[in-house]
Image (cartoon, rainbow, N blue to C red):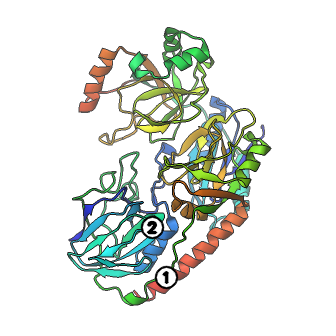
Amino acid sequence: MGGIKIRNGGALTTIQDQGRYGAQEAGFGPSGVMDRRAFRIANALLGNKETEAMLEATLLGPEIEFTETDCFVLTGADMGATLDGVPVAGYRVFTAQKGSILKLGFAKEGVRGYIAFAGGLKVPEIMGSKSTSLKVKLGGMEGRKLEAGDEIPFLNPVAKLRHLERRSISHSAESRKEWKIRVVLGLQKDYFTDEGIEAFFSTPYTILPESDRMGYRLEGIPVTCKETVDIISDATVPGAIQIPASGKPIILMADRQTTGGYAKLGAVITADLSVLAQAAPGNKLLFEQVSVEEAQKVLKTERDELKKLERRMNRWL
Amino acid sequence: MEEISILTAGDSAVTVEFDRKISPEVNQKVTAFAKALAEKKGKGVLELIPTFRSVTVFYDPFRISYGKLCELLQGIIENLEVTGEQKKRIFYIPVCYEESYAPDMHTVMEHTGLSRQSIIELHSGRDYLIYMLGFLPGFPYLGGMDERLATPRLSTPRTRIEAGSVGIGGSQTGIYPLDSPGGWQLIGKTPVRLYDQRREDPILYRAGDYIRFVPVKEKEYQEIDMHCRAGNYHCQIAES
C-alpha cells in the first residue's frame, strides 16, 4: 500500500495524535498535537476517527509526494500550500492523485500546520499512541522528526469522499501579535507575592525564541515569590505555568515533563492551549484569570461545536 | 490527621496534597490514596501521578464535575488506611564524581562549605528510597539525602543535560535517564542506562526500590560505559 513520501521535512514535522496516556506515573509525558482544536477539525472534515494521527509541521512546512491517491486536509497555520503548483486553501478537503506533490512553505499566520489524510496513517501504536516523543525518541517515525526519503503508508485511503465540495469550514487565520490567554490560578499560588501575581495578570509577556513543544519561555516583569520557588517536585499538568527563581514564566506544552520542582502559579485553560500553539516567538501574551467552572464551560462550548461538525461530516460518509 | 488540601490544577486535574515535606510516612499515604482511587477509575477519573507527597488526578470534566470529584476525593481521604512496608531492593549505581563529569561540583562546594571528598562520601554513603518516577521516563526522585548537601537549583535551567548526569536540586538528589533540559546542580555521572528501549523493561527500577551510588574512577566509568553500549552490563542488585 502506498502513502506519502517526504521530499523535504521542513523545519520540524512530526507524526502526532491526541497523545500517549496511561504511563505518566512512570514519567512518560503524553506528547501529542499542540493545537488540539485544529487536529480535531482536520479529522472531522475527513470523516476520520477523532484520534487519527496526522503530520504536525512547525514554521516551515514539508514537501510531500503522494504515492497513492487519497483525500487530505490542511488545518492550523497557513503555510501557503500548493498541490502540483496550484494553491490549496486550509480547512477544505482535497483529493491528491498518486504522484501529486503537496508543498508547504513558511507559516504566514500561526506556527503549527496540520496535514491529515482520509483513513489515516499506518504507524505502529506504542503504548496506545502514534505520537512522536522527540525527547524520549519514541513513537511516530522512529521517535524523530520527518526527513527526506521517509515513507509513511496510508491505513485506509479514500480516493473519493462523498460530498467533497461541502467538506470545509470557513476559517480566517488570525493575524495577531498579541494573544489573550486564560488561566486558572491554583497549585502553588501561595508561593507568590500579590505584586507578582498582579504583574502576571496585568502586563504583557513576550514568547522567547527558545520556546518549543516542551515549553514556552516568557520574558516580562518577573513574577516575584515570597521566599522560594523551589518545591518538593510534584506533578505537572498541560499548560502549567512554572516560575523559576528568575521570575520568568515557563508554560508547559505538549512535550512537557510529568513532574517538576518549580512552583506553579496555575495553568492555561485547555481550550487556550490550542491558541497558544499558534503564537510565535516575539508575540505578546496577555493573561486573564478565570475560574475552573468558566474554563470548563469554554471547553464544553468547543466540544459541542466539534461534535456538531463531526456529526455533519459523518452524515455524508 | 493534618490538613490535606485539594489544589486546583487547571480545568482537567486537581492535586491532592498530603504535606509539604518528604517522609516515608507521607509517601505511604500517597501510595495508599493512589491505590484506593485507582479502584474507582472509570467514573471520569482518567489517570494519576503519585509523587512524594501528593497525587495529581486527571479527570474528564464532562463525566465528573469539579465539585463531585472533590467530594469523591474527600471521601477517600477520610477512609484512608495506610498499608505496611515493602521489601527492600537496592540497585548499585556506579558514579564518577571527577571534574569532567561534575560541572557544578564547585557550586555545591561553595554553597555547602564541604570539600569534594566529603560531598562524595555523604552522597554515596547511603541508600536512597525511590519515592517516585517522573519528569522524564524513569527519572528517580530519591529521598533521604544528607541535609548538608542541599543546594538550590540553577536560577535558569540548562537547555541540555546529558543522560546519566547525577545532580542535586534543593534537598533532593537524582539521575537524568535521558538527555534533557533541567535545573539541577550536576556533581557526577553514571554510565548505566537507566532507560533503555532495548530492554524488556525499559525502566531499570520502580518506585519503592532503593539506589546506592558507588564512586568510580574515570577508567572504570569508561569500561562500564563500553559494556552498557553493547547492552551487556548488569547492574548489581541486592535484596533484603
Residue bearing mark 1: A169
Q: Nearer the viewer, residue A155 or A72?
A: A72
Chain containing mark 2? A
Instruction: Kindly state the secondary structure of the residue where label 1 is placed.
Output: loop
Q: Quadrant of residue A167?
A: bottom left
Q: Is residue B196 left or right of residue A292?
A: left
Asked if one can make out residue A70 in the rendered structure from this viewpoint, the answer is yes
Going 40% across and 22% down the picture, which residue do you hit? B101
Residue A108, label in figure: 2
Q: Is residue A163 above or below residue B201?
A: below
Place of residue B188 in the rendered image (x, y in percent of width and height, measured from the top left)? 44, 22
Instruction: Kindly state the secondary structure of the residue where label 2 is placed.
Output: loop
Q: Quadrant of residue A192?
A: top right
Q: Is residue B116 left or right of residue B96?
A: right
Place of residue B83 in the rendered image (x, y in percent of width and height, measured from the top left)? 62, 37
Which sits earlier in the primary sequence, circle 1 or circle 2? 2
Amino acid type, callout 1: Ile
Number of marks drawn = 2
Q: Residues within 10 Å of mark 1 (few under 14, many from 20)?
A: few
